[in-house]
Image (tube, grey):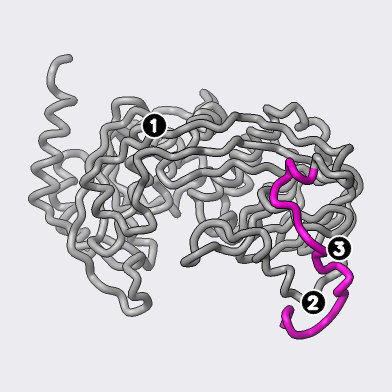
Amino acid sequence: MVKVIPYNTAYKPTGYYETAKEYAQSEEGKAARWIEVYPAYVSHSDVPSDLNDTCLEYYKSAPERAVPPAILAEVLDAREYQDSLFGGTIMSRSGKVIGDISYFEPGPNGKGRAPVQQNSLFQQRYFVEPKYYKGTVFSAVIGFNGSDNYYHFMFDCLTKLHLLRKSGLYDTVDWFLMPYPKEEYHMSMLKVLGIPEEKIIFEHENVHIKADRIIATFAERPYNHTPPWMFQFLRESFLKKEVVQDTGVPLVYISRSDSHRRNVANEDELLQMLTPYGFKKFTLASLNFVEKVKLFASAKIIIAPHGAGLANLTFCQEGSSLIEFFTSTYVCACYSEMAQKVGMHYNYFVFDHVATEKFSKGVDDHITVDVKRVQTLLDQVLEKYESPA
């Protein structure tokens, strides 16, 4: 409909700037600021080569990657248009899209950012009127992953707040534009971070906004080259004494029995083996955010199938261990990187899959675990903990 029915077409973008720096150096943006919060650097990946070789092609990790600077920019007399699937497009007062601080449609093969000139607003013909917010809006929207995916909300949305604080502009913000708070963890995390609820506005209620100033950030997070400052910020923010207390559960099995994807098909058999060791089963959807942080921060050994809830590895102790399960049709090494960044020991298995009827790409396939292989590895891991230092 938005591409067929003309309505408010005066709001259609008039052109674009490739980057916020280009905007800030233009005649139109000369009074705005562009701040390099972290400089560019070369990142090195330590993902095991055998695991990397097993990954789907898109998820394979380059051993070395040039990471561009993490930046913050302000756009004066600006607009932002939300797409519930692909995120927000930020436009200058003249209606030009600003490429690097806008988050929009996937690029080649449905992955990554598309070139700025391919932004869907250039083809759109139907626009709702903008809602005006007096003062400064900080934009932290990231598309549908902000509302539907715990991992992406933590690493792609919340870390933007760190760049805002480090830039020195936090106290100038009147409003925080955030993803739709679909789950309990959205507001719980924002509360711990000290974001005043009365200053939060949500993307699903604000498809098109206009403000005296919009502040936005860009920090590329190349696959398996997550900037170290992101881990540091999340750990410092949430591993607080008043939040984290020992749960007394050092041996943890994370079940996905509450999900339609990547269940362990023979979970009863696996639990029969794990229970005598003292492992406790948890489904993360049944825990609130603070309970999740406590669980992972107290765990000595975690066994789990691959899933977004493992983003909580960010809160694990140095020296703890992860044993991760994959299906042969979907291998993604992001938690190998995360485990190493926080000082964990990492092990994994790739098992046969049980195909689901809904999809054929493998991301939903269930896992048939070889319980004897897991037990052999578990005995080796436990022996390391029991051996004298």
Proximity of marks 1 and 2: CB atoms separated by less than 8 Å:
no
- Please tell me which residue is depicted at 87% across the width and 60% down the height of the picture: 131
Q: In front here: 354 or 35?
A: 35
Specify the quadrant that holds the C terminus. top left
Q: Which residue is mark 1?
A: 341
Mark 2 element type: loop
**Is disc 2 surrounded by few (<14), some (14 to 19) or many (20+) residues within 10 Å?**
some
Measured in 3D between alpha carbons, the distance from the residue under mark 1 to the one under mark 3, in whole angstroms, is 42 Å
Q: Secondary structure at mark 3?
A: loop
Residue drawn at point x = 76 percent, y = 52 percent? 201
Q: Note whether 87 is above or below 389 in the view shown.
A: below
Asked whether 180 or 34 is in front, the reply is 34
- x, y percentage for residue 240? 53, 26
> Is the C-beta separation of discs 3 and 2 under 8 Å?
no
Q: Secondary structure at mark 1?
A: helix
**What range is drawn magenta here?**
1-23
Tell me if I can see residue 129 in this picture: yes
Within the magenta stretch, is there residue 311? no
> Which residue type carries mark 1?
Lys
Quarter of the image where the N terminus is located: bottom right
Q: Is residue 131 left or right of residue 245?
A: right
- Counting other residues with Cα less than 10 Å from the Cα at mark 3, is it few (<14), some (14-19), or many (20 or more)? some
Q: Which residue is mark 3?
A: 130
| Earlier-in-chain disc, 1 versus 3 | 3
In the image, is 137 to the left or to the right of 10?
left
Real-space Cα separation, disc 3 to disc 2, in angstroms: 12 Å
Q: Of the residues shown, which amino acid type is indicated by label 3?
A: Pro
Q: Label 2 belongs to which residue?
A: 126
Q: How many marks?
A: 3
